[in-house]
Amino acid sequence: MLKLLPMTHLPKYQEGKLSSSRLLLLVLLCIAGTACSTAAPTGTVIFEDARGSVSLQTISDPLIQASHPINLEPALLAQLLRGIEIRDGGIGPHRRVVTGFAGQPSTYPLFSEDQIQFLAPLLADGLRTATPNQSIEYRVVTTHEGSNRFQSPTTETTDGSLYTHGRLLYVILSGFRYNPMRTNLDMADMTYRSQEPLDYSGLRYRTLRFTPNAALRADSPNPPTMKKSTDRFVAVDYQLLGQVPRAAEGQARSTESLTQEVDNLKKELESMKKQLGSQNPGQDSPKQKSAPLLNQ
């Protein structure tokens, strides 16, 4: 009969093997436990491929009745996505820092232009087909190839949802560039792990901003119910947002008209100078007339 030795009687090299195996097992369990963060979408899937997905989901809060279905142009939704910016708090793991200002927060676009072109028409389809108790869930995936043939590709996932209520568009961000390998294995954030649980959302030290500020409604009367404390949202008046291009166009036309008017005035002045010169071709200036008198 095989008798198992207690840990205190194991040789040191066997203790090392067991510790390494236990560490590997814990890492695998940790990764498996967070796999649900990148799971395939549920509900009614509108579209899904390697770039991401858009689907219809039932709103968990029964008190929220969205203004769906609604017809919003993809160009307007693209403008909405371009206006959303994410701001790092300058603390925490994986923070971005403005060059030359260590520890200072930085702000940058939430979505890339490729992601905007992917999402905008699909979100428009979702808003046209959603019911008042449904939101439109989005997910975009960025794949980074390994630096060499021995490294496997890694993925980052950004996900959230949006819905309309009245003339407001609520955009909720639930996860930002989630990477399970980086979240679980990066030893740089071990200090923070000892103080608080892992941040799978990537949003604990980040906030959202929106431009143009005139369309932002920070004092929304009916804010969405956040499922997690790390969820972030912006409320945007899409009617005001739609007026921004026309206002900018009007300002551009006004500036162009002013420039044209200045050019016309310059031409008129040049024409007047030429006319005066042609009317008095040999006339001396006052200084030239007085010069002989001074020499007498």
Image: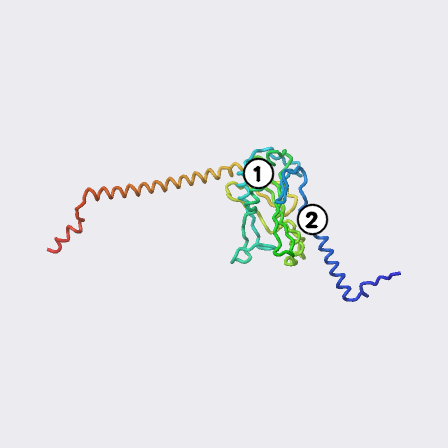
Residue at mark 2 to residue at mark 1: CA–CA distance: 28 Å
The answer to whether residue 237 shows anywhere in this view is no
Of helix, strand and loop, which one carries label 2?
helix
Q: Quadrant of the N terminus?
A: bottom right
Q: Amino acid at mark 2?
A: Ala
Say whether residue 80 is left or right of residue 248. right
Q: Amino acid at mark 1?
A: Pro
- The correct choice, above or below, for 166 with respect to 9 in the image is above
Front-lying residue, 189 or 185: 185
- The correct choice, above or below, for 112 with respect to 222 in the image is below
Residue 170 image point, x, y percent? 58, 40
Q: Tell me which residue sits at (71%, 55%) in the image.
A: 27
Q: Quadrant of the C terminus?
A: bottom left
The answer to whether residue 239 shows anywhere in this view is yes
Say whether residue 178 is left or right of residue 108. right
Say whether residue 296 is left or right of residue 118. left
Q: Residues within 10 Å of mark 2 (few under 14, many from 20)?
A: few
Determine the residue located farthest toward the left in the rendered image: 296
- The count of marks equals 2
Residue 62 image point, x, y percent? 66, 36
For mark 1, what is the residue? 121
Determine the residue located farthest toward the right in the rendered image: 1
> Tag on residue 35?
2
